Structures are given as C-alpha cells and as structure tokens.
Amino acid sequence: MIIGEIRRYLRDNNAIRVSRSLRDMAYKALQAKEKLINLNSKEPTMEEIAKELGVTAQEVIFALDAIQDPISLFEPVFHDDNDAIYVMDQVSDEKNSDVSWLENISLAEAMKRLNEREKHIIDLRFFEGKTQIEVASEIGISQAQVSRLEKSALKNMKKYFA
C-alpha cells in the first residue's frame, strides 16, 4: 500500500504526464536491458531489448524517451574555464537562420520600392495566396492588368535583390 501511494505521488506530481502503459513499457525495457547486460556482458541494442519484450524497437525508444526528465535549454553541457556550452547552443533553428533574416530584410526593402498598387497586388498574390482573377475582382481591374502589374513589380524587386 505504501509503495502504491509513493508511485501515485510520483505519477501525479510529475512535470510531464505520461500514460501508465508507456511508463510500464519503459520500466520493462530497463529491466530487460539489465537482464541482457548481465547475460551478454555488453550493452544491448534497442532491437535486442524489443525482441526480449516482444515489441518493436520504436515502441521501446518512445517508452524510454517518455520517462526521461525534461532539462532546461540553459543546462550546461560542457564547461571550459570561462565559457559554458548550453543545450540551447546545440539545438539548431532552421526557421530563424541568419539567411532567413537577411532574406526577410531584403524582401521588406524591395517591397518599399514599389508603389501602393504594386505592393497591394504582391501582398494579395504571394502573402495571401490569391489568384490573379481573385486579385483582379478585389481591386476592380482585369486579370491581364494584374498580370502586367505583378510582372512589373517582380521585375522592380529583382533589381533590388541583384
């Protein structure tokens, strides 16, 4: 009964909620890992643990990942005399790269070079995803005019990028 209460406390006061079945799978995987280490005197692979449990390696990986405690992005991974390397320094961010920032700045500067009508057409076409026909009906001009204005605006913007 005491062990049950301790488990309930740990389960209910955890930062991240993980299903009981996933947690049980993780603990079985850890037990299987210990068993295989004692048997073979070497670290078993995920496939070996999965085979021992009769499940897929992916299920074992998910289960073991689920019971890992979360760590802070500011957790030091390596510490040299003065400088520390944090988890955050090891995580890449492809969405907000330097190239992306420069492209956004260049695009904003190129858009400033357009007149109001061209800006509006480029905005509707490329940022709102509207067709030339939809843009034409919204502005009150023909699709051919939208096409010509769009072409001219893109040509002007390319000059700025080049």
Image (spheres, grey):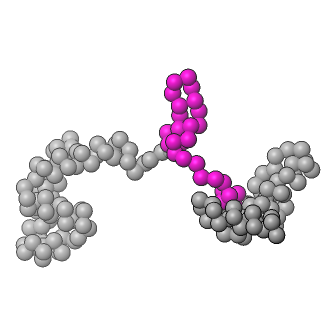
Is 137 rendered above or below residue 35? below
Task: Identify the residue at horizontal 12%, vertical 74% (top origin).
Answer: 138
Q: Which residue is nearer to you in this view: 127 or 85?
A: 85
Residue 14 coordinates in the image, percent (x, y)? 63, 60
Which quarter of the figure has residue 133? bottom left
- Report the label total: 0
Q: Which residue is nearer to you in this view: 142 or 74?
A: 74
- Left or right: residue 117 compared with residue 76: left
Which quarter of the figure has residue 47? bottom right
Instruction: Examine the rendering and report whether any part of residue 147 can be seen.
Output: yes
The stretch of residues the image draws in magenta is 63-90
Is 139 rendered above or below residue 109? below
Q: Farthest front residue?
A: 2
Q: In which quarter of the image is the N terminus?
A: bottom right
Instruction: Examine the rendering and report whether any part of residue 55 can be seen.
Output: no
Residue 127 coordinates in the image, percent (x, y)? 25, 62
Residue 78 coordinates in the image, percent (x, y)? 59, 33
Q: Farthest top residue?
A: 81
Q: Which residue is nearer to you in this view: 117 or 50?
A: 50
Is 40 rendered above or below residue 128? above
Is 43 rendered above or below residue 24? above
Residue 35 coordinates in the image, percent (x, y)? 88, 54
- Left or right: residue 4 compared with residue 149: right
Task: Identify the residue at horizontal 69%, vertical 61% (top origin).
Answer: 10
Q: Farthest bottom residue?
A: 137
Task: Identify the residue at horizontal 56%, vertical 23% (top origin).
Answer: 81
- In reply to whether residue 103 is colored magenta, the answer given is no
- Left or right: residue 89 compared with residue 1: left
Task: Identify the residue at horizontal 17%, vertical 54% (top origin).
Answer: 154
Q: In which quarter of the image is the C terminus?
A: top left
